[in-house]
Image (spheres, grey):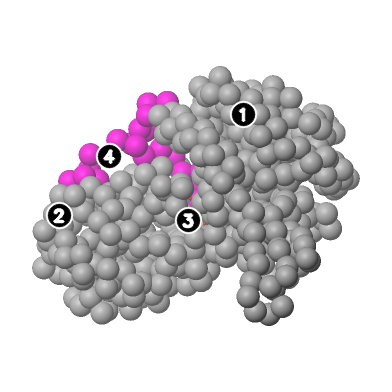
Amino acid sequence: MRELKAFINNEFINNGEWLEIINPTTLLPAGKVTALKAEDINKAYSAARNAQKDWEKLALLERISILKKFRDAILKHQDEIAKIMSEEIAKNLKDSLAEVLRTVEIIDYTFEEAKRMDPLAMTGEGMGAKNKLGIFERVAKGVILAISPFNYPFNLALAKIIPALVMGNTVVFKPATAGSLTGAYMAKLAIEADFPKGIFNVVTGRGREVGDIITSNPEIDMISFTGSVGIGNQIRAKGSSTDLVLELGGKDPALVLDDRDLEKYASEIVTGAFGYSGQRCTAIKRVFVNDQIADKLVPIIKKHVEKLSVGTPEQNAFITPVIDEKSSDFIQGLIDDAKQKGAKILFGDKREKNLMWPTLVDYVTPDMKLAWEEPFGPVLPILRVNSIEEMIKLANKSNFGLQASVFCQDISTAINVAKQIETGTVNINSKSQRGPDCFPFLGIKDSGEGVQGIRESLISMTRYKGIVINY
Ligand code: NAP
Ligand code: G3H
C-alpha cells in the first residue's frame, strides 16, 4: 500500500493523520495520503508567499530549465504514474499512460508559448499619449491555488500548475481525494527536479473537511478550480476579490441533423459518451435526433455500445468501475427514473456494485431527470425531437453550457445551428472534447467562468504591469 505525504516548503509532512484512498476496482485501500490540519495548510501558503518574489525574479528561461527537469522526471516515471492513477481512479492503463504523455505535450507547448508572451509597447496620437511610451509586461499574479477533479488527476492538475509556475507564480495544489496519490507523487518529481523551496506545495485532505480552510487563506491571489458545479458555486459564492477560473460540469448535447454519415456519427457519439465510463466533463450526455433518422442511427449506436468491453483497468477494458458506489447509485437513480417514466432501455442497465454496463436509453423525454442532470457515468439518453428549432431550444434550456456537437454535412446549416447553441464551444462533426489543448477551453452559464487552454492559462495567471516613460 502506498503512503504519500503532503509536501510543503520542500518537506514531506506527516502529522500522524492519514486519509485512505480506495481503489474503485477492488474497493480496497489503494494507499493513503496525509490528512492535513489548518495549521499545516497555512504553512503551505506562507511558504508559497515567501518563495514567490525570488522565483519571479528568475529569467523565464531559468524557470523553464528547472521545470524541464520536472517534465523529464515525468517521462522517466511515466509507467509508475500511470499505474498509480489507474489504481486510484480506475482509468484503464492505456488511457492513464495517454494522460501522462498528453500532459508532457502540454508542458512542452506551454514552455514555447510562454516565450511568446511579449510585452505590449504603446504610444498614441490622442488622449495625451503623444509624448509617452508605455510598456505593458505580463507579470505573475502571486500565489495560485490549483484545485483539480478526480477524473484527470495528472493532466488537469498540471495544466494549471505548469503555466502558473512558468510565469513566476508559486502554487498551492489541492488534488481531489480520489487522485491524491497521483497528486502527492508530483512532490517526488519536484524533488528530483530540484524545485526551489516553497514554489510548489501539495495539500491533501478531504475537500468537505479542509476545503474552506484551503480556499479562504488571505494569501491566495487566484484560484483555478476544475470540478463540479456545486463546489464551484460554493467557491464563487464566497465572493472574495480573488481572481477565479472555474471549469465545471456539463450536459453536452449532440444534435444529429442528417443521415449522410451515420457510421461516423455513431462512432463519435459512442466514444464521446462512454470514454472513461462517461466520467468526462465533455462527454456527450444527450443526443437529439428526429424520429426518421433515429430509426437508422440508434441501431448503429447500439451495435457500437454492445461491443464496448467491460472489466478492469488492468485488462484495459473500455468501461471500468465508476469512481465509487455513491456515484453508481446516483447514475442508477437517473436510469430508474427514466424507465419509470416510459423510456426504453436498449442495452445495459446492469451493474455489479460500482461497475456499470454501458447503458443506452431511447425515448427519453424532457420530464425525465436523465434529460437534464449530469450522470458522470456510462449512460446515454436519446431524445427524439422532430425539428431543429426544438433541438436548439432544448439544448439551450440546460443550466450547463460547456460544449455541444452538431452532426451535419451541410456546413452552412451546421454553422448556423452552432451559432445558436449556448455553449463555450460547438464541435461540428466530432464528439465534444477539451482538446486540442492549444485551443481555448471554456464553459458558460453554470459550466464555468474564465478560460483554460495553454495560452489562455498563461494570460489568466498573469496581469499587466505597465511602466510609462514620459519624454
Ligand atoms: P468535485 O467533487 O467538485 O471536486 C473537485 C475538487 O474540489 C476536488 O479536489 C475536491 O476535493 C475539491 N473540493 C471538495 N469540496 C471542496 C470545498 N468545499 N472547497 C474546495 N474544494 C473542495 O468534482 P469531482 O467529483 O472531482 O469531478 C467531477 C466533476 O468535475 C463533474 O461535474 C465534471 O463535469 C467536472 N469536471 C469539469 C471539467 C471542466 O474542465 N469543465 C473537467 C473535469 C471535471 P475532494 O475530492 O477531497 O472532495
Ligand atoms: O472532464 C473534463 C475534461 O476537461 C475533459 O477532457 O475532453 O480531453 O476528455 P477531454
Determine the CA span between mark 3 and mark 1. Answer: 24 Å
Residue that badge 2 annotates: 262
Is 213 or 32 nearer to us in this picture? Answer: 213
Cβ of mark 2 under 8 Å from ligand 2: the answer is no
Q: Secondary structure at mark 1?
A: helix
The amino acid type of the residue labelled 2 equals Leu
Is 374 or 165 nearer to us in this picture? Answer: 165
Residue in view at x 79 percent, y 59 percent = 216
Q: Secondary structure at mark 4?
A: loop
The range drawn in magenta is 302-330
Q: The C terminus appears in which quarter of the rendering?
A: bottom right
Determine the CA span between mark 3 and mark 2. Answer: 29 Å
Left or right placement of residue 127 versus residue 253 in this view: right
Q: Earlier in the sequence, mark 2 or mark 4?
A: 2
Residue that badge 1 annotates: 68
Picture disc at residue 425: none
Q: Earlier in the sequence, mark 3 or mark 2?
A: 2
Q: Earlier in the sequence, mark 1 or mark 2?
A: 1
